[in-house]
Image: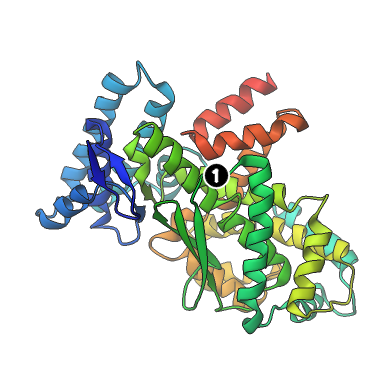
Amino acid sequence: MTTPAMGGDRLLPEPDPIAREYLLLGLRLGQHIPGLVDGYFGPADLKAQVDMEQLRTPSRLTADAAALRERVAAEVRPGAPQRADWLTAQAVALETQARALAGEALPYLDHVERCFDFRPQRRPDEAFRKAAATLDALLPGAGTVGERLAALDRNLTVPVDRVPDVANRLVERFRSRAAAAFGLPSGERLRIALVRDQPWSGYNWYEGGLRSRVDLNLDLPIRAPDLVHVIAHETYPGHHLEHAWKEADLVVAQGRLEASILLINTPECLISEGLADLGARLVAGPDVAAGILADVLAWAGLAPPTSTENLIEIAALRRGLGAIAVNAALMRHEELLPHEAVRDYLVTVGLMAPERAEKRLSFIEHPLWRTYVFVYSEGEALLRTWLERAPTDEQPARFGRLLHEQLTPSAVQLDVASSAA
């Protein structure tokens, strides 16, 4: 039996009872938390049912999540332990968010841990200071590190009218490399759009039917090295390829309809953002990075005052500095420091321009993203460690598991620990 998919023109299998309960739980909780449902391409009748029924209370949804966990333990775990682990971790995250809505909020860091199946750790400031010292030695020109970064940024800014062409060229470059390394599900496709007034730099909206729309935010100038990273992150082998393969493999081929809803602030997000950041390294790694950036600079009509190799090293250091968002979120929500103090920390220790520090803080303070901020650097660090536990020639296949399987952060941590023993 089949039912129409929400996001495309495919027919999907009928969900089993466990998947049905999970989809209903996510859709119902999404009525209370705007943005929680990041994408839905599951059965249309379930979405219609939730839209028409009386709103369920947070307390009732808390009980629904607990009941789902019990059913998963009894009915799924004996035959499919990986699926059971994934469903359980996701249900814990949804139960945690429902409890918070019902007035049973946990301390911030405990809430984060239950949402992501992972407890973030504060990074030592000394690591950021070392990165700043290395940047000081690499940056061209005279002045403070901040002044020279600002000057370099002006030379690296892709003109707005050239962003669509450069982005589409990069998409095709990365699509070819991802196809060779990981394969592509037949019929997948995506499109690029430009937006403003968003707290993020780029976003993949997965629509189902193997289709995505990728939004690039023009609120701040787009630097050429950042555009290389964000395109790989959002498209190939990042979010678009992950969602397309999981739709093809998990939903259509295996009938695991729980994968037809994408839910923010759940463990799947830490895996997804981590693999997207890690995947950028795989398609734009050391063997091709200089050539890719040189092409982007040419397409954009830019001539920066230093070599592409130097620019790549500078960009890597700046992405490493981006992990300071972990500390900033803990300072703002765990230590309850004021906005101005955290902004100054991002500027002085993280070397962010004031306008970028404000944009980052708008993300950290946003009701939906205040917990999500951890998934990028923490997810990438976890998955990089896991990937590097495998021999070099086996790493593409190990990365491929992230595109096809229902892995949880705790399962990855356990694998890392066992391989280190």
Residue at image point 70% right, 34% down: 395
State the image quarter where residue 94 is shown: top left
Q: Position of residue 402 (x, y in %)?
A: 55, 37
Question: Would you say residue 374 is visible in this rendering?
Answer: no
Closer to the camera in the image, 319 or 338 = 319
Left-right relation of 405 to 294: left
Tell me the residue that label 1 is attached to: 120
Residue at image point 35% right, 15% down: 78
Instruction: Point out the residue furthest to the left here.
Output: 54
Q: Position of residue 274 (x, y in %)?
A: 58, 46
The amino acid type of the residue labelled 1 equals Pro
Please tell me whether residue 364 is drawn above or below residue 6 in the rendered image: below
State the image quarter where residue 417 is shown: top right
Please tell me whether residue 365 is drawn above or below residue 421 in the rendered image: below
Left-right relation of 192 to 257: right
Query: Of helix, strand and loop, which one carries label 1?
Result: loop
